[in-house]
Amino acid sequence: MPGFALRSAGVEVRAPDPNAMAGRLRSGSPPVFCRVTERGVLFDLRTVAGDELPDLARAIGYALEGDDVDEE
């Protein structure tokens, strides 16, 4: 609805190749929709129910497997 803002929160997960990570997430079962940024992949948590958070975390972990992730 124009002129109406929805409250939300986003989480960006940094990845060496954000496009590849997003592709793995989108082709998973179930698919995870996200937005690619310069440094990583952004998730809009407004679209994730509380009981879906463990599944999202697991999907992110799988999507990061094999990437050279710098853990700071």
Image: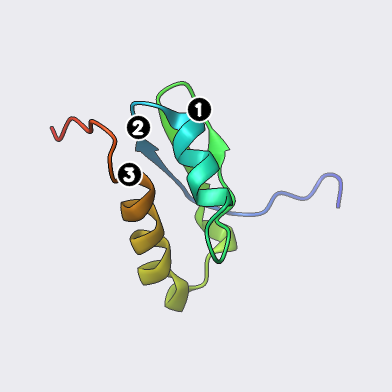
Image coords of residue 54 (percent x, y): 35, 70
Q: Residue 55, which numbered label? A: none
Helix, strand or loop under label 3: helix
In the rendered image, the vertical position of residue 21 relative to residue 54, given as above or below? above
Question: As rendered, which of 4 and 44 lies closer to the eye?
Answer: 44
Query: Outermost residue, front direction?
Result: 66
Asked if labels 1 and 2 touch by Cβ distance under 8 angstroms, the answer is: no
In the image, taking residue 35 as reference, residue 6 lies left or right, namely right
Q: Callout 1: helix, strand or loop? A: loop
Residue at 31%, 53% in the rendered image = 61
The three-letter amino acid code for the residue at tag 1 is Thr
Q: Which residue is mark 1?
A: 37
Quadrant, the C terminus: top left
Residue matched to label 2: 15
Residue 50 pos. (x, y %):
45, 74
| Residue 64, percent from left and from top | 32, 44
Compute the Cα span from label 3 to label 2: 7 Å
For mark 1, does the 10 Å Cα neighbourhood hold few (<14), some (14 to 19), or many (20 or more) residues? some
Q: Earlier in the sequence, mark 3 or mark 2?
A: 2
Quadrant position of residue 56: bottom left
Labels 2 and 1: the sequence-earlier one: 2
Q: State the residue position of label 3.
A: 64
Specify few, some or many for label 3: CA neighbours under 10 Å numbering under 14, 14-19, or 20 or more: many
Q: Calculate the distance from the C-alpha at mark 1 to the C-alpha at mark 3.
A: 15 Å
